[in-house]
Image: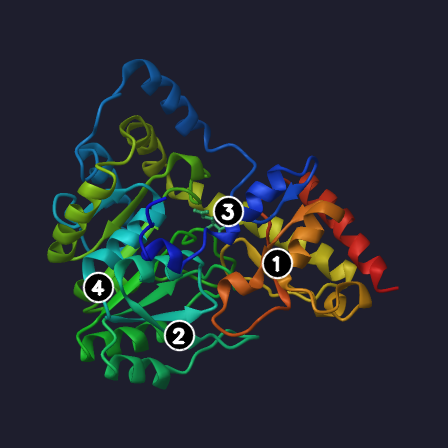
Amino acid sequence: MPELSKRVGTFTDSVIRRMTRISDSCPGSINLSQGFPDFDPPKALMDALEEVAHKGPHQYSVTFGAENFRAALAKKVRKNFNRDIDPENEIVVTCGGTEAMMAAMMTICNPGDKVMVFSPFYENYGADAILSGAEPIYIPLVPPTYSFDINLIENGFKEGAKAIIICNPSNPCGKVFTKEELTAIGELAIKYDAFVVTDEVYEHIVYKPYKHISVAGLPGMFDHTITCNSLSKTYSITGWRLGYIIGPKDVIEGAKKVHDFLTVGAAAPLQEAAVAGLTLPESYYEELGELYTKKRDFFLKGLDEIGLVHTVPQGSYFVLVDISPFLALEQFRGWTDLRFCEWMVKNIKVAAVPGSSFFKEDVNNLIRLHFARSEEVLQEALNRLKKLENLLK
Ligand code: GLN
C-alpha cells in the first residue's frame, strides 16, 4: 500500500471519543467519558428544527455563517465583549468548537511557531498544534487550585510564543480563570504582541460565586484575542456541530479562508433552527447554571460518600477522580490509567477518560468523569462506582 502522510502518524485518535465507542460496545455501560448531555435541548430549538424541516433552508448557507445566525450571535455576545461585534467582519461560523480551534490555529501559526498551552489541557489542542505546525510550550496548572506562574508565561512570550491557549472554564480541571489572571496574561500578550486564543464552550456552566470573563472583553484585548466557542454545551446540542470564532477583522479574514476550504459551512438548517436558542432570554442561562449546580452538588456528594478523592469544578461539568488507591492494589499493579478505564467499562459499567489524555506531565492516577446526566443515571453510576470502594476492603 502507498505510504500515508507523516502527519497522521504523529497523533492518535481522540481518547475521549474512543472511550465513548468502547462504552457503546459494552451493553448497559453508563458513559461518563465524552461530555455531552442526556437531556433534550430547549423546546424552542426543537420546535424550530421541526419547522425548518419543512420550510428549509436545505441548501448551503453563506460560507461564513447564515446572516441571521451571525446577527443573532453578535447580539447575544455583546454583553460579554463589552462592545458591538460586526457580524460581517468579526465572526465566522464553524462546524463546532473543534473546527473553530483548528481554524484559529491554522490561521495564526506557521510551522515551528511556539504556542503556550496549559497542562492539563483539552485533548484536541495537541492535534490542533500538530496539524497547524505549532510547537507547544506547556505551562503547568498546579493543583489543588490549578494556579499558574505568570513568570513562566512571560518566559514563553520571551521565547517568541505567538499565542497562548486558554480553556476557560477549563476542561478537564474545572478552573474558572479570574479577572486578575486574565488581565495579567492579556497585558503580556499586548507587551509581546501575541494572541490569546480562548476556548469558552463552558461559559454558561459556571458555579457560584465564580464568574466567567471573556478575555476579549477586557480593556485593549479585543485585537489580541481569538475567541472560539460553540452552541453545543450552552443549548445541549453537541450533535448539531455549531461553533464560531470571534476576533479582529484581519484574523477573521484569514480564518474565513481556512474554514471555506475545510468545511465550506456549518449545516444551514441547523443554523436556522439555532437562532431560536441565541434569542432566548437571560433567564435561560441562569436556569442552565442552576441545573448544572444541582448535578454537580449531587454527584460530588455521592463521590464523597463513596470516599473517592476528586476535584471540585468551578465551571464545566467534569471532575477528576484520584484512582491511586486502586492502582496500589495487587490486581492493578503497573496498570496505566487507560487500562484501568477499559477495565472499568467492562467490570463496573461506567466509562471514564484516562487523565493522561489531558496532561503533559506523567500523570497516571486520575480519571475524568462528567456529570451532564439525569440524577437517576448519576445515582446509578454512583451505585456502580461504590463497587470500586469494596475492592479496597
Ligand atoms: N468537550 C467534550 C469532552 O471533553 C467533548 C467534545 C468533543 O468530543 N468534540 O468530553
Q: Quadrant of residue 96?
A: top left
What mark, if any, has residue 338 been given in the picture? 1
Secondary element under disc 2, as helix, strand or loop, is: strand
Q: Earlier in the sequence, mark 1 or mark 4?
A: 4
| Residue farthest to the right, as pictured | 393
Seen from this angle, which residue lies furthest front? 1
**Residue 34 can be seen, yes or no:** no
**Residue 160: percent from the left, percent from the top?**
22, 79
182 displayed left or right of 195: right
Tag 2 and tag 4, C-beta contact below 8 Å: no
How many residues crowd around disc 4 within 10 Å: few (fewer than 14), some, or many (20 or more)? some
Q: Is residue 104 above or below residue 267?
A: below
Look at label 4 and name its amino acid. Cys
Placement of the N terminus among the 4 image quadrants: top left
The outermost residue toward the top is 54
What SS does tag 4 mark? loop
Q: Where in the figure is residue 146, as x and y percent of width and height?
A: 50, 73
Q: Earlier in the sequence, mark 3 or mark 4?
A: 3
Up-down relation of residue 151 to residue 244 (above or below): below
Identify the residue position indicated by label 3 in the image.
Answer: 17
User: Image point 24% across, 70% down: which residue?
Assistant: 112
The residue shown at (31%, 41%) is: 95
Could you tell me how far apart the alpha carbons at marks 2 and 3 are, in whole angstroms? 23 Å
| Residue 138 badge | 2
Alpha-carbon span between mark 3 and mark 1: 13 Å
Label 2, label 1: how far apart the Cα atoms are: 22 Å
Q: Are marks 2 and 3 in contact (CB under 8 Å)?
A: no
Marks 3 and 4, how far apart at CA: 26 Å
Query: Marks 2 and 4, Cα distance to the nearest angstrom?
Result: 17 Å
Report the mark closest to the observer, 2 or 1: 1
For the residues marked 1 and 4, what is the alpha-carbon distance in whole angstroms?
32 Å
Q: Which residue is mark 4?
A: 109
